[in-house]
Image (cartoon, grey):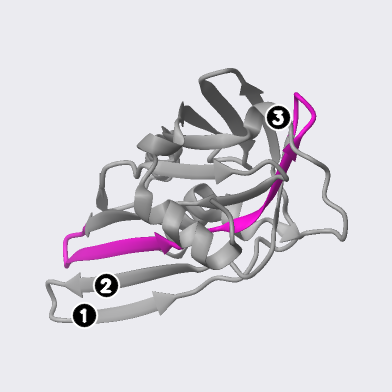
Amino acid sequence: MKRIVTLLFATLASPALSQGACPAEVPFPDPCLVGNWIGENSAVIRLQAAIDSMPLPDAERTVIMGMSPVLGMTVFDDGLYATLPFHQDMEVITVTEEDTLSVEMNLAIGTQVGFIWGDGTNLQFCTTGDSFVALQVDAESTLGGSSSTMITPGGMGGFTPVITYQCSANTLTYQVQLPAPIGTVDYYLERFSDARFPAEFRALMDDRFGVE
């Protein structure tokens, strides 16, 4: 189960956990990146495939993934970006001859703030503060045991994934290269006008950073 928790963090939280602190001078972004973006990624699919590739001896394991979260990001003219918070849930049921263990995991990732830039091929992020990432793990056994744990991980141990991207007038796609067994996580985002982006998010950004 520890390895599954590690995979969950690596697949869904790696962009938040692997960002380094922003340098004194941050390059201006590729102008195409500026705007509001909403979409999804293939993290849930990659995580499911990674778990399925790890068979258990003398046990049967079932993984129930929640729906992929909606991802949102605003990039401003100077490269400042902020993301919409999201969460992902999953349940892992392990059945043996003696017991059935059910583990529910709920991963929460708060608004990420930093700077983003790209050279037309590679995309880079940095963070202006700590990234809130927390995982609630609740386990229950048919033998009568139960537990509940909150995990707040640190960074990714100096690992920074290579991110390639393609940006056009209406779409932004990028690929986060993660180690095996995860592999490449693809992001697919569409551009949204200010009028269609959540008003609450714009108000939050204006309150915190003085931008509209």
Q: Mark 1 points at which residue?
A: 146
Q: Does the image show residue 56?
A: no
Distance from the alpha carbon under mark 1 to that under mark 2: 7 Å
Q: Percent x, y for residue 49?
A: 41, 36
* Residue 112 part of the magenta segment: yes
Q: What amino acid type should be assigned to the residue bearing mark 2? A: Asp
Q: Residue at x 39, y 36 (%)?
A: 195
Q: Which of marks 2 and 3 is in front?
A: 3
Q: Identify which residue is drawn at 52% across, 55% down.
A: 13
Q: For mark 1, does the 10 Å Cα neighbourhood hold few (<14), some (14 to 19), or many (20 or more) residues? A: few
Q: Which of 59 and 116 is in front in this view?
A: 116
Residue drawn at (68%, 41%) of the image = 77
Which residue is under mark 2? 138
Q: In this view, does 125 lie above or below 142?
A: above
- Name the image quarter holding residue 137: bottom left
Magenta-tinted stretch: 95-122
Say which amino acid is labelled 1.
Ser
The secondary structure type at the circle numbered 3 is helix
- According to the picture, the residue beneath numbered tag 3 turns out to be 31
